[in-house]
Amino acid sequence: MKYISILLLSVIGFSACRSNQNENTTAQPITLTDVQPGPIRHDSLSAEQIKKITEIQQTFYEVLPISVEQTIIDFKRDDNPDKEIEVWQNMASAYSQYLAGLKKAPDLETKKEIFDLLLSRSMVTSEEALKNTKRSKLSDDEARKILSLYTAEPDPVTVVKNYDPQPAK
């Protein structure tokens, strides 16, 4: 699922990605063309993992219309699917809690902003998420309320830059 995160962040104009090529890693912006999905690292996932992934996919389907099958494949690409499932469950919990507390359901664009904000927050601090997430529908107060519902530590996306061993001719 982190690969989806990377692609989404490229679309919304923000990414908090780090390369682990050396010990002095720093956050660097990347573009969509820089990202290729990694290999599938797990041939299968447990029934419990698939149940959690299905719940995550259902929660976000309106703002992230990806099939359950593709979502499962994306989680199979993660080094640690359980850790990534936990991140996405935290996002889904904050998203659902915020929506449940509203008197009127927001429009799709507002829901997308809520999702983008939570996705950003899953990788960076609340203050960084506020600064780096484009918003036109959510006020600062609404954004802070949403961010207060996500209490896990940031888990930055790690991008490994692969170099072509063949020199250009």
Image (tube, rainbow, N blue to C red):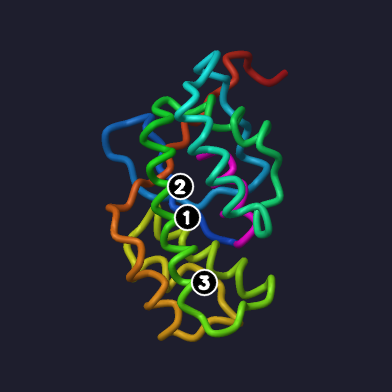
Residue tagged by mark 3?
Answer: 99
Counting from the top left corner in percent of width and height, residue 74 is at 58, 32
Give the amino acid type for the residue marked by disc 3 in the picture.
Answer: Leu
Would residue 135 appear left or right of 127 to someone viewing this image? right
Front residue of 135/145: it is: 145
Magenta stretch bounds: 1-12
Of pointers 2 and 3, the one earlier in the residue sequence = 2
- State the image quarter where residue 48 is shown: top left
The residues tagged by marks 3 and 1 sit, at their Cα atoms, a distance apart of 11 Å
The reply to whether the magenta stretch includes residue 110 is no
* Residue beneath the point at 49% across and 66% down: 117
Question: Label 2's element?
Answer: helix
Quadrant housing the C terminus: top right
Q: What is the number of the mark on residue 92?
A: 1
Would residue 169 appear left or right of 110 to someone viewing this image? right
Residue tagged by mark 2?
Answer: 88
Are dots 1 and 2 in contact, CB under 8 Å?
yes
Residues packed near mark 1 inside 10 Å, few (<14), some (14 to 19) or many (20 plus):
many
Is 11 located above or below residue 155 in the figure?
A: below
Front residue of 63/100: it is: 100
